[in-house]
Amino acid sequence: MKVKITSDHAGHLAKEELAKRLEKEGYDVELFGSTSADKSVSYAEVGIEFAKEILKDKDDENTKYVAFCGSGLGISMALNRFKHVRGARVTSEEDAHLAKLHNDANVLCMGGRMLESDQVENIFHEWENTQFEGNRHIPRINKLDEVGEDN
Ligand code: RB5
C-alpha cells in the first residue's frame, strides 16, 4: 500500500513521525509539501498542489492520501476546492470511522499541533480499515462533484 502525505510547516513533524511509523509497518510512503518545520509554507499552496497530485493519480485505490497543517482546517479547505477530492478534517477515531463510512473521505486531514503521534497513527488505521457504506451516501457524495475545480 502506498501512502502520500503532505503538510505545511506546522504539520511537518507530524508528517515525518507518521511516515516513520508507516514505513516500519511496511507501507511505501511518499512525502510532499514542507521540507522543514522551520521553513514556513502556505497550507493553501500545499493543499492545492496535493489536490492536483490526487487528481493526477485518479484517486488510485492502492494509494492513501493524508494531509496535515497546524489544525487540519486550512489544508482541508484548500483540498476541498477540487471536484472528486473529499478531505475530512478529523480529530478522533470516531471521526475517522464516519469520514470513510458515510463520506468516503479520500484525504485524511489532521492537525499536527493538536494530536499526539499515537492518536495520528490510530486515526490513520481506523480510516484506512473502514469501508464506505455506499447506498444512500452515493448520491450525496456525487452531488458534491457538481461544483469545484477540475484540476
Ligand atoms: C500555520 O501557522 C497554521 O495557521 C496552519 O498550519 C493551519 O493550522 C491553518 O489552518
Image (cartoon, rainbow, N blue to C red):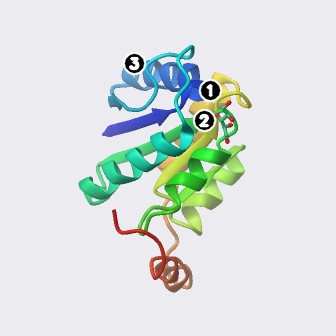
Mark drawn on residue 46 = none
SS class, disc 2? strand
- Which of the marked residues, 2 or 1, is nearer the chain's N terminus? 1
On whether ligand 1 comes within 8 Å of the CB at mark 1, the answer is: yes
**Residue at the image point whose x is 47% and y is 72% from the top:** 148
- Which of the marked residues, 3 or 2, is nearer the chain's N terminus? 3
Is 113 on the left-hand or right-hand side of 23? right
Q: CA distance from mark 1 to mark 3?
A: 24 Å
**Residue at the image point whose x is 42% and y is 45% from the top:** 65
**Residue at the image point whose x is 45% and y is 35% from the top:** 6
Kindly indicate the quadrant of the structure image that contains residue 22.
top left
Mark drawn on residue 10 = 1
On whether ligand 1 comes within 8 Å of the CB at mark 3, the answer is: no
The residue that disc 2 covers is 69
Q: Is residue 62 above or below residue 125?
A: below
Q: Amino acid at mark 3?
A: Lys
Q: Nearer the viewer, residue 58 or 103?
A: 58
Q: Is residue 109 above or below residue 33?
A: below
